[in-house]
Image: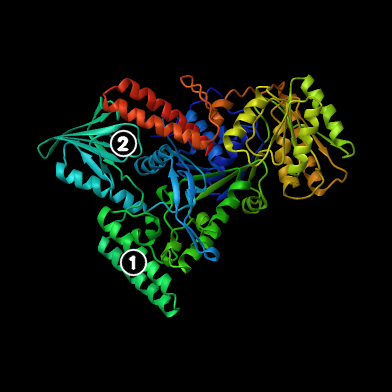
Amino acid sequence: MDFKLHSKFKPTGDQPKAIKFLCENLKNGIYEQILLGVTGSGKTFTIANVIEKLNRPALILAPNKTLAAQLYNEYKKFFPENAVEYFVSYYDYYQPEAYIPSTDTYIEKDSSINDEIDKLRHAATAALLNRRDVIIVASVSAIYGLGSKKAYKENSIPIDVSVGIKRSDFIKRLIDLRYERNNVVLERGKFKVKGEVIDVLPPYQETAYRFTFFDEDLESISEINAISCKKIKSVKRITIMPATHYLSVLDKEDIFNEIKDELKDRVNFFEKENKILEAQRIKQRTEYDMEMIKEIGYCKGIENYSRYLSGKNQGEAPDTLLEYFPKDFLLFIDESHITVPQIGGMYNGDHARKQVLIENGFRLPSAFDNRPLKKEEFFDRIGQVVYVSATPSDYELSHAKNEIVEQLIRPTGITEPKIIIKKTKNQVDDLLDEIQYEIKNKRRVLVTTLTKKMAEELTSYYLEYGLKVKYMHSEIDTIKRVEIIKGLRKKEFDVLIGINLLREGLDIPEVGLVAILEADKEGFLRSRRSLIQTMGRAARNVDGRCILYADIMTDSIKESVKEVERRRKYQEEYNTKNGIIPKNTINSEIDSLNGIIEQEDTKQEFNSIEEINSRIKKLEVRMKEFSKDLDFENAIKVRDEIKYLKNVLMELM
């Protein structure tokens, strides 16, 4: 099926030029290029048009789960008829396995898996193996080992009613694919057997399949509601994908023999070094893991044996999500100035942690091969890439060379904010006057400082003057941050003070002023790139201004001001030429986008992610009870609330 873009809007401003430039370069085999687009210029819409025109599978890589969730929702709206999937880390909480030699402390791996995100990850890989019209929105989880694509594909069960499958063989195959039998409640990755009927709920979808047999022979396949078990439609043929990504196509005995050989070498090594405790530890732990794999096909930390399960050589790169894509896929790296360094930074941290575990007998050296990709391995595995950023870094600029297309025009006609530079003398009182002016005009203010102490003192000072001020710092969790931003938009308060106010992705049309204190203190938070990003927070309001308090015109200030003024001049000329009158954006999506939890049924407020997880667990128990009592109407209502809360978690994690 071809990609089909749904939108009531047509490309405007710089979008047609950017779409044409990107498409021509991609058709001509250009490997790397940059879409340099300002905040609010519709970069996502431009990329959607490129995907539709080239009709190639696409991977959209975002720097964090929140931005990935926003992009996922946008692309789903653009492509409702195509497969738009979401692939991020499925951990709500993750404590990696570690060992601290100085205190002889072993920290066992501890994690909490988000069932909804796990389902979406399975949906992503299943879609890639079954169709071409696929867009995957992912975080850097895409560079972590996933399990062999070959094993995942070869272990799938294609079933055609006309060909059939024996009932006993089908049950055995499901168990081999790590589906668990549960004859009470049908859950993801499980199957239920009742006489000649087998119900299966694959881990990648909401609906289940019912296989009806006559004795051993397959008679029919139906898609059914997973809770009520009511028939949705008849199915002639389907493919059941595995319940896990960690499977092997190799003979188990061969795998065990290879692990035993490595274990023998490692025990000998420790004994020669007179490390008897380490020798006993690695022998005991590895033999226990092998016993578990023999008995149930799985063990805790099975990913540490991924080299053997996937048939890889020592040091060979792991299979990742990238292996599931066809060779001609397109890669778009969103906020590339943040995301690209993440790709390069994951390997070293993982290697250092594993080194300690291996040296102390907690893991075999082959555990090194369960790892994220190195930066060069990542770029070796992709075809063509478009870096998307308002402030591309030196890496992107040097690699894309001159293949850069700018997208500076916003559909709203709003220009870059006016830049005002003031001396730092009396900056606090001067800013007080500016804040009062903005409040009088019903606009909000963002203030960014360099230190926590200054932010706290500034907040206290302005509160004494009767201003409605809040301070946002790093210790505030995600849900509270969202509540604070929501409060600012709803005029519960007027001024938000912080140190690094979410330079990327903070979209508040009500903000009329961004004030940058100590703008002349060179460093990461006052670099050219950071200043441009921070100034951009005022570019959603027609009256947007940015005041820099500085005594010295640093190179970063000169360069950032020059760039913002260049963009502003270009935008003003375009507006004049085309008779465009700038108008403020009305972004009513803050509640849904950021996951503010106000379900009409519950009106319940949550203060932390743990509280949402606790609520979900309680609801899941209730849903199962309703289902058991055949009260499907209430079961479906509870399921919908669970789904809502899981979507909130997906955006917040």
Q: Position of residue 275 (x, y in %)?
A: 44, 75
- In the rendered view, tell whether residue 23 sits above or below residue 357: above
Q: Position of residue 176 (x, y in %)?
A: 25, 50
Horizontal arrangement in the rendering, residue 578 relative to residue 647 (left or right): right
Q: Residue at x 33, y 53 (%)?
A: 150
Helix, strand or loop at mark 1: helix
Q: Could you classify mark 1 by the number of other residues whose Cα lies within 10 Å: few (under 14), some (14-19), or many (20 or more)? A: many
Name the mark on residue 44: none
Q: Position of residue 524 (x, y in %)?
A: 72, 49
Report the front residue among 478 and 4: 478
Q: Name the amino acid type tagged 1.
A: Ile
For residue 115, what is the image quadrant?
top left
**CA distance separating discs 1 and 2:** 34 Å
Q: Residue at x 63, y 47 (%)?
A: 337
For residue 486, what is the image quadrant?
top right
According to the picture, the residue beneath numbered tag 1 turns out to be 259
Horizontal arrangement in the rendering, residue 566 relative to residue 230 (left or right): right
Report the front residue among 254 and 47: 254
According to the picture, the residue beneath numbered tag 2 turns out to be 187
